[in-house]
Image (spheres, rainbow, N blue to C red):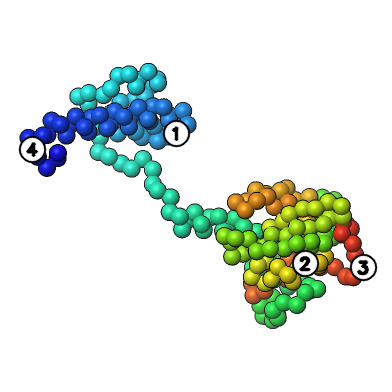
C-alpha cells in the first residue's frame, strides 16, 4: 500500500493500529519492564498511568523519532559470559606437586606467580572444610570444552562437582582416585547443573594438576 499514493490514508490507518497495539502490549508489560515502558511512552508522546489507558487509543498524536528500546542478544557474547562463569584454575597460581602425571613445568613459568597473599589466622583456615573424596564416576560435559562432571564419595555422602580440568584429564584417568575438595563451599547453580563443592587443583598457566593424597586415605577424611 505504501507504494500507492492513493492509499496513503490506508497506510496511516494500519500504522496507527499497529502503534496502538504496541502501546497496549507496553501498558501490560509496564509492571515488569518499567524502563522499556518509559522509553516507549517517550516515543509515543503519551505517559503510561493505568492499565485502563488501553481503552483510549492514541489518535492525532505526533510520535518521536524512533530509538531502539532494546538490543538483541548476541549468542556469541552470551556463550562467552557463560563460559567465563565456569570454574577454572587461576593462571597465576604457583605450582604444587600432584599425584598424577601432567605436563612438565619450568621454574620460569612458575615465577609468574605474584607475591604471597595476606596472612590469615588459624580460625580463618578452620572455616574451610577440606575433605578427601573418591571419584566414583567422571564424564565430559556436553556444551563445554572446559568442564568435567565428577560424582564423588565423601564418606557416605555423594556429591556432584563440575571442575574446569577437562583440558588436562580424560574422565577415565580420574575414576577411582582420591581428590581433595572444599566441602563447605556454597553450591553454585550452573547451566549444566548444580556444583556442590570444588576440587582442588594447581596450575601455572601451562598445565592443570588435580591435588590428591597418599595411599591409605579414605573418603570423608578431613584435611588439616
Residue 173: assigned label: none
Total count of labels: 4
Residue 112 can be seen in this image: no
Query: Which residue is located at x 90 percent, y 65 percent?
Result: 217
> Where 155 falls versus 3 (above or below)?
below
Query: Which residue is located at x 68 percent, y 50 percent?
Result: 194
Disc 2 designates what residue? 175
Residue 74, x across and y down, in percent: 43, 54
C-alpha distance separating marks 3 and 4: 90 Å
Query: Which residue is located at x 89 percent, y 62 percent?
Result: 218
Between circles 1 and 3, the one closer to the viewer is: 3
C-alpha distance separating marks 1 and 3: 59 Å
Residue 33: assigned label: 1
Q: Depth check: 91 or 103 in front? A: 103
User: Closer to the N terminus: mark 3 or mark 4?
Assistant: 4
Asked if residue 40 lies left or right of residue 96, the reply is left
User: Closer to the N terminus: mark 1 or mark 4?
Assistant: 4
Between circles 3 and 4, the one closer to the viewer is: 4
Query: Which residue is located at x 62 percent, y 51 percent?
Result: 190
C-alpha distance separating marks 3 and 2: 17 Å
Asked if residue 32 lies left or right of residue 136, the reply is left
Mark 4 crowd level (few <14, some 14–19, many ≥20, 10 Å Cα): few
Quarter of the image where the N terminus is located? top left
Disc 3 designates what residue? 216
Q: Are marks 2 and 1 in contact (CB under 8 Å)?
A: no
User: Closer to the N terminus: mark 2 or mark 4?
Assistant: 4
Under circle 3, the secondary element is: loop
Quarter of the image where the C terminus is located? bottom right
Residue 34, x across and y down, in percent: 44, 31
Amino acid at each position: 500500500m505504501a507504494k500507492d499514493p492513493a492509499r496513503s490514508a490506508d497506510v496511516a490507518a494500519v500504522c496507527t493500529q499497529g502503534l496502538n497495539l504496541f502501546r497496549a502490549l507496553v501498558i501490560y508489560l509496564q509492571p515488569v519492564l518499567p524502563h522499556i515502558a518509559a522509553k516507549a511512552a517517550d516515543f509515543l508522546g503519551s505517559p503510561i498511568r493505568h492499565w485502563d489507558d488501553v481503552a483510549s487509543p492514541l489518535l492525532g498524536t505526533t510520535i518521536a523519532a524512533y530509538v531502539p528500546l532494546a538490543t538483541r542478544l548476541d549468542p556469541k557474547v552470551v556463550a562467552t559470559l557463560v563460559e567465563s562463569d565456569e570454574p577454572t584454575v587461576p593462571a597465576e597460581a604457583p605450582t604444587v606437586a600432584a599425584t598424577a602425571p601432567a605436563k612438565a613445568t619450568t621454574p620460569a613459568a612458575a615465577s609468574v606467580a605474584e607475591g604471597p597473599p595476606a596472612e590469615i589466622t588459624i580460625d580463618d583456615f578452620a572455616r574451610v572444610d577440606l575433605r578427601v573424596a573418591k571419584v566414583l564416576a567422571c564424564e565430559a560435559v556436553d556444551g563445554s570444552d572446559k568442564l568435567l562432571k565428577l560424582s564423588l564419595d565423601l564418606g557416605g555422602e555423594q556429591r556432584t562437582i563440575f571442575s574446569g580440568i577437562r583440558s588436562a584429564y580424560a574422565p577415565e584417568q580420574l575414576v577411582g582416585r582420591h581428590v581433595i575438595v572444599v566441602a563447605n563451599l556454597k553450591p553454585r547453580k550452573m547451566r549444566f547443573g548444580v556444583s556442590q563443592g570444588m576440587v582442588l587443583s594447581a596450575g601455572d598457566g601451562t598445565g592443570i594438576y588435580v591435588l590428591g593424597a597418599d595411599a591409605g586415605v579414605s573418603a570423608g577424611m578431613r584435611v588439616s
